[in-house]
Amino acid sequence: MTEINISQKVAILVDGNNIERSIHSRYKTDQVMINFDSLVPSLLQDRALSRFIYFREGKNISSKLADRLQERFHGSVQPCHKSADIPLTIKATQLASKVDTIIICSGDSDYVELVSHLKGEGVRVEICAVEDTLAEVLLKEADFFHPIEKSDCYNFPKPRKKRPIKKKS
């Protein structure tokens, strides 16, 4: 029997605020972040990464995160004026004809109509989220679910407060 190699192009779109709130809620600390270095390969499972975009509300986005995503995945960070819902939805519809699968990293029920639309366009849609905060309606609409586990995160230490330098008199 001949082995068939099926290649898929995948886009990963991350609603950064939703994922951050979810993991902070799940692990009861804001000192935990997603470890994309381990999460992305497990999401891809030998498929080709076409796009990786991290959407985040606000202008204060870590330059270290942006540099890391660019370096590892040729990814980008997209600042959003308000919520990531609309920019992520627009980008997903733009990518629908260019990829086979779109992985949306969010458990937000606001994406249900997007998932339905993408599936209607012939795109496989997978959801990656913290199970505790995942909207049931989104889970039912998706083709596949990847739970974000503790092993997909890392803790970082709280920054130490700088002590004022005492001046000698």
Image: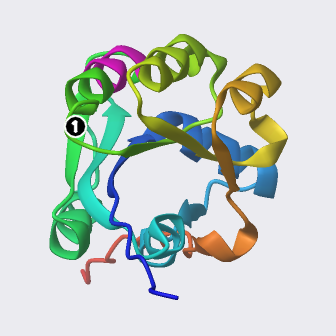
- Residues 94 and 135: in front is 94
Q: Quick check: 36 above or below 10? A: below
- Reading the image, the residue beneath label 1 is 78
- Given the image, on which type of amino acid does mark 1 rest? Gln
- Residues 67 and 155: in front is 67
**Is 72 positioned to the left or the right of 13 in the image?**
left
Q: Is residue 83 visible?
A: no
Residue name at image x 56 percent, y 46 percent: 20
Residue name at image x 45 percent, y 75 percent: 41
Q: Secondary structure at mark 1?
A: strand
Q: Quick check: 132 above or below 7? A: above
Q: Quadrant of the C terminus?
A: bottom left
**Is 56 positioned to the left or the right of 19 in the image?**
left
Displayed quadrant of residue 92 = top left
Residue 6, percent from left and from top: 38, 67
Residue name at image x 28 percent, y 62 percent: 49
Residue name at image x 53 percent, y 63 percent: 34
